Image (cartoon, grey):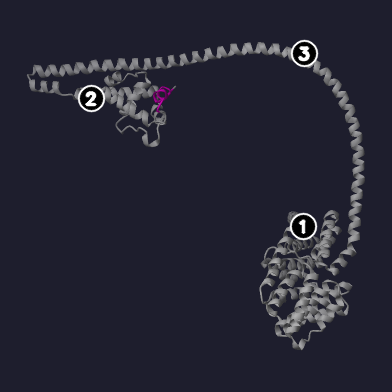
Amino acid sequence: MKNFFLLISICLFSVQTFARTETDSVLQNLFYTIKHKSAFDSKKEEKILQIKKSFNIPDLSDNQQYNINFELQNEFQSYKIDSAIIYLKKNLSIATRLNNLEYIYCTKLTLAYMYWQTGRFFESLQLVKSVNRAQISSELLGDYFEAHKRIYRYYADFQNDTSNDFFEKSGIYRDSLMSVIDCKSKKYEILRAEILTEQHQTQQAAQIVEKWFAQSLVDSHDRAVLANILANIYWQEGNKEQQIKYFAISAICDIKNSVKENASMLSLSLLLYQSGDINNAYHCLQSAMDDAAFCKARFRTYEITEFFPIIDNAYKQKIANQQKKLKVYLLLVSVLSLFLTVTIIFVYRNLKRIGKIRKELYRANLKLQELNNGLKLLNTQLNSANSELLLVNKKLSETNLVKETYLVKFIDLCSNYIEKLDGYRRSLNKFAKDGKTEKLFEQLKSSNFIQNELKDFFTNFDETFLRIFPTFIDDFNALFSPAERQTPKADEILNTELRIFALIRLGINDSSRIALFLRFSITTVYTYRSKLKNKSFFKDSFEDEIMKIGG
């Protein structure tokens, strides 16, 4: 049982450690993205400029102007709200001129949202109420309900009271919105997750939002919205680690899409402040304030100004504490510097004394070095002499081994040849006694005896040579590529090529002597030597390499 609880504790600790590491990584990415915010804004401005170029098209109709204005306001609505309002007002004029109710109501609903962002709650609500529900199309009905839901919900949140009428009205319009949209759509499921969160069923709500979050495009504005929703769900659960992670992801996506009207950066700043991370909290708050001021989002600016003094004071207090510590450190450094100065003076005096001693030692070392050089020269000469002696001894040993081996073999061969010649003589003598002259002449004319003796002789030579140089064949073949290596036949010990260079290894370099030994012509021997030398890796020093075999 103890082991079980220990395993559970280890698993929980591992999960927490991984979660912290993941959150730290996301925060590092966020602060890197904040540093490069201007690059993303430049891309946004370039995109807006490209859309504005559409106005240069000659003879634009009111419908075309309306669509260009709507596209521009769509780019400006979370970037520069006052610019978005300008283009929406232009569209309202065009829609009124065209007497197009669809355009009028669509523009009013969008403009109402812009007014709310600038803190003009009353005007926003009046604009939404001016839309006649009976006249709007089924396509705009969802936008109509969503506009009411948003305005009442934001107003309820602004008052920080979920029991007020605005919160209730927001819920009613949310239900109406859910009744007119596809129950399998993302919007429907996100609204259902919102209801589950209000009912404190946060796990089911998180599962719904996480499914859509996983399907969202990386760095998209949709991902920013979903991450913000997830962070608020985890706020209900009290999971700060996950809140920080998802608010940071949302803030990253907002920066990359140049969304200046955002809530995630401010929420993240407050969380970091509560966690004691004053530096990062201040930087996030500063970024949120810069964005709110840039896009003229008065509501966000108001929210930020409520918390800015708290975090700013905490940041300043931290800086002040750091400055106090710095002063203490400077004092310590000053004391240490004084001590170091005294120490340096003391060391300097000692170094002067040591310098004198070193000079005397240097002179003594020079004399010793001269003596050492003389000894080294003598040692070098001795080593050279020893090496020459070792080489001579090795050659003598090798020569003695060859002599002893060949002497024994020579005695055996002589004895065998005497015996064979005597046997051959007796057989010829018998043929002569018996009067078998034809047999006698036949034997005398036949070369079988000589051939057999030569074969035996070469076999004895090969065996004796390989006893002295057992690795000769492998060492010889190592001088060639695999395709040019020599392989004796099954009934041979050495082939002709190997036998020629075996004789060279024994010191017989003269082609005429080799030819006499092997019963070849001098030309044949020379041809073999030249052919193998040209095929080897060592064309210029081939026979020198042969002499190194077995050395």
Location of residue 200 with respect to 516 vertically, above or below: below
In this picture, which residue range is highlighted in magenta?
A: 539-550
- Picture layout, residue 290 above or below residue 125: above
Classify 10 Å Cα crowding around label 2: few (below 14), some (14-19), many (20 and above): few
Q: Residue at x 92, y 41 (%)?
A: 328
Position of residue 300 measured from the top left corner of the image (x, y, whole percent): 84, 67
Q: In this view, does 194 lie to the left or right of 547?
A: right
Q: Do the residues labelled 3 and 1 touch (CB within 8 Å)?
A: no
Give the residue at mark 1: 34
Provide the residue designation for mark 2. 452
The label nearer to you, 3 versus 2, is: 3
Q: Is residue 199 magenta?
A: no
Residue 157 drawn at (x, y percent): 85, 72
Answer with left or right where residue 283 lies relative to residue 313. Answer: left
Q: Residue at x 83, y 65 (%)?
A: 292
Where residue 420 sits in the image (x, y, percent)?
A: 22, 18
Q: Distance between the residues labelled 2 and 1?
A: 99 Å
Q: Mark 3 points at which residue?
A: 360
Whole-percent x, y for residue 226 in the image:
73, 68
Circle 2: residue type: Asn
User: In front: 172, or 397?
Assistant: 172
Mark 3 or mark 2: which comes first in sequence?
Answer: 3
Alpha carbon distance from label 3 to label 2: 86 Å
